[in-house]
Amino acid sequence: MASDLVTPFVQAGSEVLDQLAGVTAEQGEVVARTPLFATQAVSIILGVSGALKGQVIYGMSEATAAKLTSIMMGTPEAPFDGLTASAMGELGNIISGGAMALLFQAGYQCDLTQPTIVNGTGVDIATKTPAVVAPLETPYGRIDVNIALATA
Amino acid sequence: MARLLIVDDALFMRIMIKRALEGSGHEIIAEGENGRMAIDLYNEHSPDLLLMDITMPDMDGITALKELHAQHPTARVIICSALGQGNKVKDALASGARDFVVKPFTPARLLDAVNKALL
């Protein structure tokens, strides 16, 4: 996958994590996923349509989701619940929205679906377009940005 | 003091919007989760201002904005969305939105947009 499709998600991810949670994220090595790949416990899945088609899947541990939700809400850490799912879904939505704005400037006019949030270990995901993963390392754990996009 | 309606499918974002407007003197009179609810709640409560997301289930915010303006041409609506690319902003403003607040926003940015839309 061309790096011009990966960079917007990494850039938006770093900026949004800083703005919403005051978290500094370091980008790890971008690597290709196998066609069927295991996610971390919490997956935030968004569909992309328009000039690009496919999915973006953000993966993190339950502990990372709990910590980020706690910071974003200004509340004590709590077990995974509907509010955690909503907060992480919105985090994925806002990062992806920022990436869509950058992709628009690069000539790709795209839309997003609402996020779907999955919580559970041992979940394997297959995407039609092979994914690459761009890890974002935060002080509260790694966020995997799985990007499976192809030009329409 | 104005009476505000908030429509966003994310509970987290509805909480953040309410917090941003806390202490502003405005009252949140109702909340909805999709474009259809936005129209129904607007007709039920006649708010002074509607704050609405774009990407929502059942009916998206731009479709709801167009339907609402067909029924209430003077309705004050602010779109509050993560989809801040130029075409979305143009579409929202051309459809009658008073402002377009891109997520993530600061409380000051949101309150400024609300107060200007109410003038």
Image: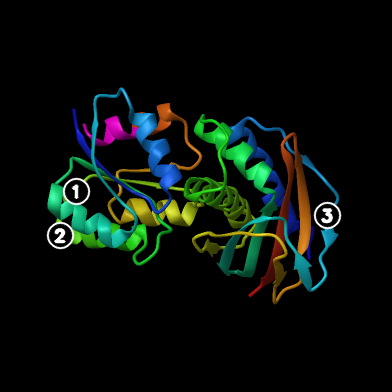
Tell me whether marks 2 and 3 sit on the same chain. no
The magenta segment is: B113-119
Badge 2 element? helix
Q: So how many labels did they put on this image?
A: 3
The chain under label 2 reads: B
Asked if the residue at tag 1 contacts the one at tag 2, i.e. Cβ–Cβ closer than 8 Å, the answer is: yes
Q: Name the residue type under label 3.
A: Val
x 68%, y 40%: residue:
A14
Q: CA distance from mark 2 to mark 1?
A: 9 Å
> Residue A125 in magenta?
no
Q: Name the kind of residue labelled 1 in the image.
A: Ala
Image coordinates of residue A20 in percent, x first then y, are 57, 35
Q: Which quarter of the figure has residue B22?
A: top left
Residue located 58% across and 51% down the image:
A92
Quadrant of the drawing holding the C terminus of chain B = top left
How dense is the environment of label 2, judged by Cα within 10 Å: few (below 14), some, or many (20 and up)?
few
Q: Which residue is mark 3?
A: A30
SS class, disc 1: loop
Query: Which residue lies under the disc numbered 2?
Result: B71
> Looking at the picture, does residue A111 appear above or below residue B24?
below
10 Å neighbourhood of mark 3: few (<14), some, or many (≥20)? some
State left or right for residue B49 relative to residue B89: left
Name the one closer to the observer, A121 or A71.
A121
Tell me what residue is drawn at x 36 percent, y 53 percent: B92
The residue singled out by tag 1 in the image is: B75
Q: Is residue A124 left or right of residue B71?
A: right
Residue A149 at what x, y percent from top left? Answer: 68, 67
Q: Residue at x 60, y 69 (%)?
A: A51
Viewer-closest of B104 and A43: A43
